[in-house]
Each structure stands twice: as structure tokens, then as C-alpha cells.
């Protein structure tokens, strides 16, 4: 069976799929809305969505999607979230001119980013930013799994402001017929 998640290999949602839905095949889609669509169309048995981050708070887009009457939340679990500053092999923190990542990741690392004094740019998700990285003057905030998946160097570990940073992920299923 398949479980849909937003992002790419190495995304925190992908890691949540591997940790909390081990018997399912993770399938990447482009957005949280696409996760819900894949579940309601039967393209995936269930979906993995971020619900709440210990530092950045509720994921508003997910909350709005969960108000739909055709999906239901069936499980939730917390995943530790460690953000690392990644770059191309040979890049250095001193050579960076920009940091790119998902808005939630940027907010979870606000203090560390302020200390670097570099401009930031939003990306669709952490792993997609890592996958697309092609400039040695750009760093991305993403997971160690994303670094491994895309051959990137970890320039600085544990950029998250809260050492106990975690995200609660939820598994959704399609409601059938008379379910409430």
C-alpha cells in the first residue's frame, strides 16, 4: 500500500513515513493539498501531513485541509526535527550569500540564521530545496537524509533554535460513505 507525502526523498514528511508507516510505500507529491487529493482519489491508501511544530506552531494549511469532510485523521506521532545547513561539496559557510528553505524551517532556525546575517529565500519544501541546489553560494536548511540523498555537504549541524524541535505528523485516510 502507498502513503502520500508532500516533498521529496529526505523531506521530514518522508522520514515520518519511514518511521511511522513502515509497511507502506512512500509516494512523493507536490503539496499538502495533493496529499489529500491522492488519498481521496484512491491513489494512496493514506497520507502523511505535518500538524504542529514545537517551535513554529500549527501548520495552518494542514488544519484547513483536515476540516474537509472526506478525510479523517487516524494517527499522529512526533518526529524529532534537526535542521542542518547544507551546501554543495566544497562550499563553506563563509562563501554563502543566501539561505533557502521552507518557511517553517526558516522560522525554526530564526536565531541561528540571524547570527549568519544572510538573506533567506522561501522554497516549496526542505528536500526540494536540497534537490535543486546548484549554486555554491546558496545554502539550504534540510535534514541529514536530504544531504545524503542529494550528495550535499553538511556545513553546519543543528541550526534549529530549539534542541528539542519536533513536528507532530498525522496520518489521514479517506472517509467512506456514512463515516463521521
Image (cartoon, rainbow, N blue to C red):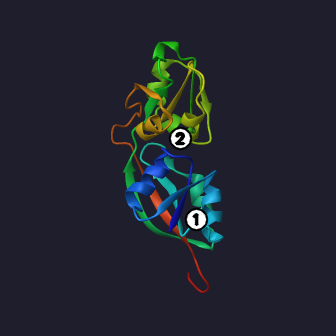
Specify whether residue 165 is in view: yes
**Residue placed under numbered mark 1 in the picture:** 66
Most foreground residue, 59 or 134: 134
Q: In the rendered view, would you say 90 is above or below 86?
A: above
Q: Where is residue 34 in the image (x, y as percent from the top left)?
A: 65, 58
Q: Position of residue 161 (x, y in %)?
A: 40, 33
As helix, strand or loop, the secondary structure at mark 1 comes to helix
As helix, strand or loop, the secondary structure at mark 2 comes to helix
Numbered disc in front, either 1 or 2? 2
Judged from this view, the residue extending furthest toward the top is 94
**Residue placed under numbered mark 2 in the picture:** 127
Most foreground residue, 123 or 130: 130
Q: Where is residue 122 in the image (x, y as percent from the top left)?
A: 62, 34
In the picture provided, is 131 more to the left or to the right than 16? right
Judged from this view, the residue extending furthest toward the bottom is 178
Could you give the CA–CA distance between mark 1 and mark 2, rounded to whole angstroms? Answer: 24 Å
Q: In the rendered view, would you say 154 is above or below 63?
A: above
In the picture provided, is 152 more to the left or to the right than 162? right
Q: Position of residue 146 (x, y in %)?
A: 47, 39
Most foreground residue, 51 or 138: 138
Q: In which quarter of the image is the C terminus?
A: bottom right
Amino acid at each position: 500500500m502507498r502513503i502520500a507525502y508532500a516533498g521529496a526523498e529526505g523531506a521530514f514528511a518522508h522520514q515520518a513515513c519511514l518511521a511511522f508507516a513502515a509497511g507502506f510505500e512512500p509516494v512523493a507529491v507536490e503539496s499538502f493539498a495533493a496529499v489529500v487529493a491522492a488519498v481521496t482519489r484512491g491513489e494512496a491508501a493514506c497520507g502523511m501531513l505535518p500538524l504542529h511544530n514545537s517551535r513554529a506552531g500549527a501548520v495552518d494549511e494542514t488544519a484547513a485541509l483536515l476540516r474537509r469532510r472526506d478525510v479523517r485523521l487516524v494517527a499522529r506521532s512526533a518526529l524529532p526535527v534537526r535542521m542542518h545547513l547544507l551546501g554543495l561539496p566544497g562550499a563553506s559557510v563563509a562563501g554563502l550569500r543566501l539561505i533557502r528553505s521552507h518557511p517553517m524551517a526558516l522560522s525554526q532556525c530564526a536565531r541561528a540564521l540571524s547570527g549568519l546575517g544572510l538573506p533567506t529565500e522561501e522554497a516549496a519544501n526542505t528536500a526540494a530545496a536540497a534537490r535543486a541546489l546548484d549554486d555554491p553560494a546558496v545554502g539550504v536548511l534540510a535534514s541529514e537524509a536530504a544531504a545524503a540523498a542529494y550528495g550535499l555537504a553538511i556545513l553546519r549541524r543543528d541550526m534549529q533554535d530549539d534542541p528539542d524541535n519536533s513536528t507532530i505528523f498525522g496520518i489521514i485516510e479517506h472517509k467512506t460513505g456514512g463515516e463521521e
